[in-house]
Amino acid sequence: MVERGAGDLSLPDDWPADPEAILSFNRMGSFDWDLDTGRLHLDRTAHELFDLTPGEFDGLPASLAPRVPRIDAQRLDARVAEAMKNGGTDYGSYFRVRRRDGTPRWTHTQAHVRRDASGRPRRIVGIVRDATFELNDRAVRARRTGPEPVGRRTGVVRVATESLAHARTVQDIIDVLKDSRGLTHLGAKSLVLGLVEAGRIRLVAEGPAGSFVPGTRVTRIDEPYPMSEVVRTLAPRFIESPEEFAESYPVLWPHLTDLRITSAAYLPLIAQARPIGALGLLYHDRYGFSAEERDVLVALGSSIAQGLRRAMFYEQEKDLATGLQKAMLPRTIPAVPGADLAVRYRSASLGRDVGGDWYDVIPLPGGRVGAMIGDVQGHDTHAAAVMGQLRIVLRAYAAEGHTPATVMARASVFLHELDTARFATCLYAEADLSTGVVQLVRAGHLDPLVRHTDGTCRRQPVEGGMPLGLSAEFGRLDYPVTTIELDPGQTLLLCTDGLVEQPGADLDDGLLALTALVEDGPRDLQGLADRLCAAADERGGDDDVALLLLRRVGSGASPQPGGRLQHRVTAGDPRALRDARRTIRSAVAAWGARDRADDIELVADEMITNALVHTDGPAVVTLRVLAGTERRLRVDVEDPSSALPRRREAGDSGVSGRGLLLVGQLADVWGVEARGSGKCVWSEFVVPPRA
């Protein structure tokens, strides 16, 4: 009986010799994958092929992950994604199923993608069948007719090359070498793989585990070992008998006697005329190599070398891109009095280059903090570079004291004028932690979520503008401001779409799933962030994930009786007064004073206009809710001039002189206060108690 390892896919000795009997093992099951719900239905035979009982499978595709090797799962996911993205209707793929006892069995699936009238994928239906006999027919022929013809053996190189084509990293290459059906068909007892690093050979894989020779984990190229020899000479070394092995390598041979090695093939791995490593295949049941077998092995070594070279370049580029993005993201998150913060970043789980996702936290004067999250279009180093520049610009505009709407508009102009065709989505929140007033501005990004103190979570709708860069391109720089109150203990969640996207589901459905996940998540902010990222990792996906959680902390769980909002209006900015009006109206509505919104907005507008017209500096507008015997809303407008305002008589056709008269008529009370560096004109309005 031939000894078989866990990765050996040759036919078991107890399989029937009659071909018709063998065909009975080719079982076929069916499946139906509802892309709207994410549920996968398997029939009875399909359960058997995955070695599952119906009660074990919960209907989620991710639950099949322990049954399918990672490299096969990635190849299968790529086929499905390609069919769905490119408008295809059919796909097929071979993959392995790891049974309960650890033995693999080859399986084949053929499926059809069903789409609705708009072309959106809705369901995938197909069959899954046992393909072990199909892929092992060469082993059956070899038992009956002797060694395979040259054409059959060259098929081994083709199969191995196809497997290597889906390998991205060096570890993927190692997995292919240890599990590939091509190598097991060659009958190798064990293998060793070493890579050249700084004049030495470092062993990176051996199989079966623990079969390497002690002291050879790292060896010099000039040492008397076969791997060192093929790296020095760039020529393969075929050892055809134990006697030849013992004579040629007396230092190594004593350590191999327990493996019962009868022959070996050591292949240099050469890429771009340079040795990058060596592969050793050890046999225990054969002597010598024919000319055809040597050609096949040399071709196999060349294929492996090219795959390793691609993997090394990929990992270098990945490290460069990852390092670039880490340099562009904030090194640390500042401690902000009055808030707990948690941030996370995860690169795409399918191995794509890092992209342009970012987050930032900006301490601002007056107990305020800015929190932003965004995503630059694309997944490459250019996206990461654009992200870094855009993040710094947004941070600078916010720190200069511009309003959230102005911050977004100026950042859009900057990105449009940058030498790039990329656009970006962004969400910016400016929170006054002493009062809980939060101003939100959205540029084509996802709405945030708010988690309440009782654990419930809701989506917070934010009126939005166009993505950054595009709004400047089309001259639509209007970014509405949405104002909300964040009570102590409540948490604001900002994220990029990588945390929300699910295969075959709308973003709205993904937000609903995220909301449920937040409600079920831990109370601890860091634990909640870890749980959300873990769920994204389990689901997989081809996009990066950025996450920012901001929880307002306070002395009590109940909200404060009043609110406070401050807004700076710069002279000469045509959008500043319009943004101020919108912010005031939004804040008044959030504080439950909607009935007096028109009066308050009109009085504030008049006070701000007077400050801008009759002084040389900016106006600072502060809205406060005063709690007392009656609830009042107070509007303060400060300017740098010490000259007090005075009433003037307006003629029948006059266009000025009516401002203070209007303030006196609409406000319940108003006045002027001298300040050390200017003055403050104020007005108060009686508003109904908060519900």
Image (cartoon, grey):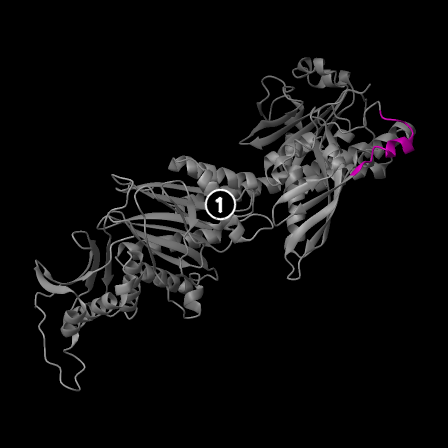
Q: Position of residue 180 (x, y in %)?
A: 71, 33
- Figure quadrant of residue 130: top right
Where 472 sits versus 255, above or below? below
Q: Is residue 166 visible?
A: no
Where 108 sits versus 395, above or below? above
Quick one: quadrant of the N terminus? top right
Q: Is residue 423 left or right of residue 172?
A: left
Q: Which residues are magenta?
A: 15-28
Q: Is residue 101 left or right of residue 604?
A: right
Q: Report the residue at 16% width, 51% height from top.
A: 628
* Residue at the disc numbered 1: 514
- Figure quadrant of residue 557: top left
Work out whether residue 578 or residue 254 is closer to the camera in this orientation and state it: 578
Work out whether residue 652 or residue 466 is closer to the camera in this orientation and state it: 652
Q: Is residue 664 left or right of residue 375?
A: left
- Figure quadrant of residue 173: top right
Q: Position of residue 541 (x, y in %)?
A: 56, 45
Q: Is residue 469 visible?
A: yes
Q: Position of residue 433 (x, y in %)?
A: 27, 47
The total number of labels drawn is 1
**Crowd class of label 1 (few under 14; some 14 to 19; many from 20; radius 10 Å):** many
Q: Report the residue at 26% width, 57% height from top.
A: 400
Where 655 sits versus 430, above or below? below
Question: Any magenta on residue 301?
Answer: no
Helix, strand, or loop for circle 1? helix
Where 209 sits versus 684, above or below? above
Question: Any magenta on residue 23?
Answer: yes
Q: Position of residue 226 (x, y in %)?
A: 67, 24
What kind of residue is marked 1?
Answer: Leu
Work out whether residue 419 or residue 344 is closer to the camera in this orientation and state it: 344
